[in-house]
């Protein structure tokens, strides 16, 4: 009888140990994937889609997470308008600056454009050109932190980027538009969520939204 009890206790200890190890391994995988998605690599190529990966590479990606290089701007503001200006916008209370392109004049409606996850401002060139020439609006294209000409090399998928939206809108109201000018915010994907959070958390206001 005593031997049976000892065997039962040993079995329970082993099962509990296996569960603890499995839980730890699962959390390690989750941590690796989350970190890979939030912290951009300094260089190299982006991880290909799963169907394009070899079996060993697929297994490694499952363990280590995807590789996403820091988004860099390969084009210039002249692709929007020859009169564009390029400058940086400081984020209040943080050691963060945002790269930006401004094309237009202070008496025209202004559309501020915010890109999506793992992208940068030149991904919105087509939209910017449309607003600029089809609608006669001024445009301000902004790099979120960690992308393009901005500082840092990470993303928070819209959380801290809401502060970037607030900083860009504040800068635009102070330096780029008249008090009675129309201001519209355009956001794609993560840019849309960052705008909504900026409205909710930081009281950002605009005359229109395209999300």
Image (cartoon, rainbow, N blue to C red):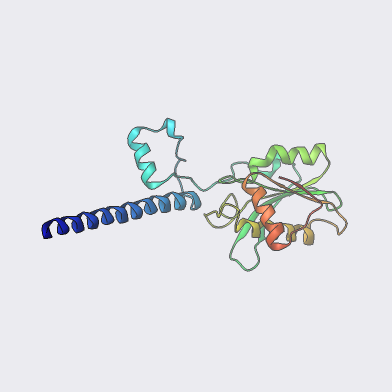
Instruction: Measuring from the top left, give residue 125's x and y in whole percent.
Output: 68, 40
Instruction: Measuring from the top left, give residue 78's x and y in whole percent.
Output: 70, 42
Most extreme residue toward the top is 51
Question: Which residue is drawn at the image coordinates 65% and 57% (left, top)?
Answer: 162
Instruction: Measuring from the top left, give residue 138's x and y in whole percent.
Output: 79, 47
Q: Is residue 87 visible?
A: no
Most extreme residue toward the front is 1
Question: Which residue is drawn at the image coordinates 60% and 57% (left, top)?
Answer: 159
Question: Which residue is drawn at the image coordinates 66% and 44% (left, top)?
Answer: 188
Left/right placement of residue 32 relative to residue 208 reads left
Q: Is residue 121 visible?
A: yes
Compare residues 162 and 176 and report the one nearer the observer: 162
Placement of 125 over or under 185, stated as above or below: above
Compare residues 51 and 101 and report the one nearer the observer: 51
Left/right placement of residue 154 relative to residue 83 reads left
Residue 178: quarter of image:
bottom right
Instruction: Measuring from the top left, give residue 193's x and y in whole percent.
Output: 65, 50
Quadrant of the snapshot with the C terminus = top right
Left/right placement of residue 13 relative to residue 89 reads left
Compare residues 68 and 139 and report the one nearer the observer: 68
Most extreme residue toward the bottom is 93
């Amino acid at each position: 009888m005593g031997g049976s009890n000892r065997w039962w206790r040993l079995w329970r200890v082993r099962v509990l140990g296996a569960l603890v190890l499995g839980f730890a391994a699962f959390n390690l995988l989750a941590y690796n994937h989350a970190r890979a998605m939030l912290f951009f690599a300094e260089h190299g190529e982006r991880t290909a889609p799963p169907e394009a990966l070899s079996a060993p590479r697929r297994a490694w990606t499952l363990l280590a997470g995807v590789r996403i290089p820091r988004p860099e701007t390969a084009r210039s503001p002249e692709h929007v308008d020859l009169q564009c200006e390029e400058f940086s916008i400081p984020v209040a209370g943080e050691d963060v600056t945002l790269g930006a392109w401004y094309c237009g004049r202070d008496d025209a409606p202004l559309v501020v454009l915010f890109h999506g996850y793992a992208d940068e401002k030149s991904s919105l060139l087509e939209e910017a050109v449309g607003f600029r020439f089809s609608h006669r609006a001024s445009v301000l294209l902004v790099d979120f932190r960690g992308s393009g000409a901005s500082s840092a090399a990470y993303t928070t998928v819209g959380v801290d980027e809401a502060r970037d939206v607030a900083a860009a809108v504040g800068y635009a109201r102070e330096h780029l538009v008249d008090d009675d000018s129309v201001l519209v915010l355009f956001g794609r994907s993560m840019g849309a969520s960052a705008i909504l959070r900026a409205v909710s958390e930081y009281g950002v206001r605009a005359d229109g939204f395209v999300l």
